Amino acid sequence: MENKKYSREIEGEINKNLENDKVLLLLWARQVWKTTVLKKIRDSLEKQWKKTEFLNLEKNNFRDILDNDPENIFQLIWNNKEKTYVFIDEIQYLKNPSNFLKLLYDNFSDKIKLIVTWSSAFYIDKKFKDSLAWRKKIFYIYTLSFNEFLDFKDKIEYKEFLWKKDIPLLYKTELFNLYYEFINYWSYPELVLMDSFDEKIKYLKEIADSYIQKDIFEAKIEFREKYFYILKILASQIWNLLNMNEIANMVNLSVSTVENYIYIMRKSFHISAIKPFHTNIKKEFTKMPKVYFFDLWLRNYFAWNFDNFNLRVDKWSLLENLVYKNFLGKYNYDEIKFWRTQNKNEIDFILEKDKKAFEVKFNLKKFNIKKYSLFLEKYWDFSLECIDLEKSLTIFWKKTWITKKKLETSKVF
């Protein structure tokens, strides 16, 4: 169902980097139109009379050839004096992908330009033995931003309001209805283009079952049903502190097993965990992070709640999760934190790099700055701002692609 009529924002950014020598490493969530994006980039190169080749390491038997010697790639592709743009899909299936990329870059960057994809991030910690240092440029590609969502809904006339303070009343109701639909249901390209609600739910189930099962299989998860049960627990606890001991007791598993399952969920782009911000360990420190979902459709699926957004009792937590996801368009994982004291004074998001703090409220009238005097007195050089529903719509219109980002908790990059 992938349609070349629509584009992902990431395409332009990748195109800008095709002429440098760096390896382009594209990390994808599932079902975000990887095939379409790669094909469009390849077609664009070929229209410029550039030589391209495409290798899919998931579906063919080339892995053994490349594992034996990276230079064997020249047995697979046609290469002459002209530089060849080589697309390698699912490079994590190689035994030593970092060595493969390093050798080809160091010795043949004048002959080939590598554009490689990687679908499961947990492989990186296990298989990347070399950081590739300055040899690479990384892109994380997630599901649709609201900006892209409007493109896919053929509502591009509303996009100009996303970076304006005041939305004309003539457009406001319809724009917010689209926003509610985006938050509540659909951020996958396929889903946006489907008409039938039943068809969309069926597709959601297929993604949740088949693709998460694939992650489970590849990560060698032993207790599959309990893995799904933990996802359901987390779906009911957006913004809560992640208590590994509590979850371990609920599912009757060891804490170390639960920690490993949470790690797999993070590396598979299902959930993210942000760390606490502190300068005074005794008064402020808590080891427990807060959990958010990368995609609210997945959270709503495991919570099995697709009620109208305005009728939901959990809409404020969905908004907080959405704000977090939009911060990912501008900041590294480890740059987004939260603040909480032992006395449960807390602020939702801390961006230490920019000296900014944000509290999320569904209704701006419920924000009372006096409640945060402890933080403002202690961190007098930080600004504090409240993000409500309307502000979340207008200040987070930027693209969702991320470049030069470090993988969460990964020592490799």
Image: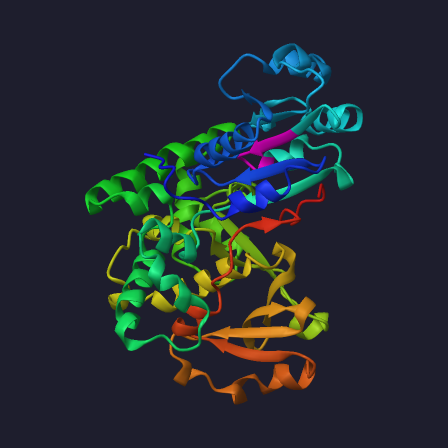
Residue furthest toward the right?
107
* Colouring scheme applied when the structure was drawn: rainbow
- Side (left or right) of 165 relative to 308: right
Residue 83 % position (x, y): 68, 24
Residue furthest toward the bottom?
370
**Position above or below: 167 against 260:** below
Residue 58 % position (x, y): 51, 21
Q: Is residue 55 visible from the viewing direction of this image?
A: yes
Q: Is residue 363 magenta?
A: no
Residue furthest toward the front?
48
Query: On the rendered image, what quadrant is the N terminus found in?
Result: top left
Q: Residue at x 72, y 72 (%)?
A: 279
Query: On the rendered image, what quadrant is the C terminus found in?
Result: top right
- Side (left or right) of 87 relative to 303: right
- Which of the two residues, 124 or 91, is positioned nearer the viewer here? 91
Residue 121 picture quarter: top right
Q: Residue at x 44, y 76 (%)?
A: 165
Q: Is residue 115 magenta?
A: yes
**Position above or below: 265 against 49:** below
Residue 310 picture quarter: bottom left
Residue 231 % position (x, y): 42, 47
Q: Is residue 256 visible from the viewing direction of this image?
A: no
- Which of the two residues, 165 or 325, is positioned nearer the viewer here? 165
Disc tally is 0
- Side (left or right) of 97 relative to 43: right
- Which of the two residues, 247 or 72, is positioned nearer the viewer here? 72
What stretch of residues is rendered in magenta?
A: 114-122
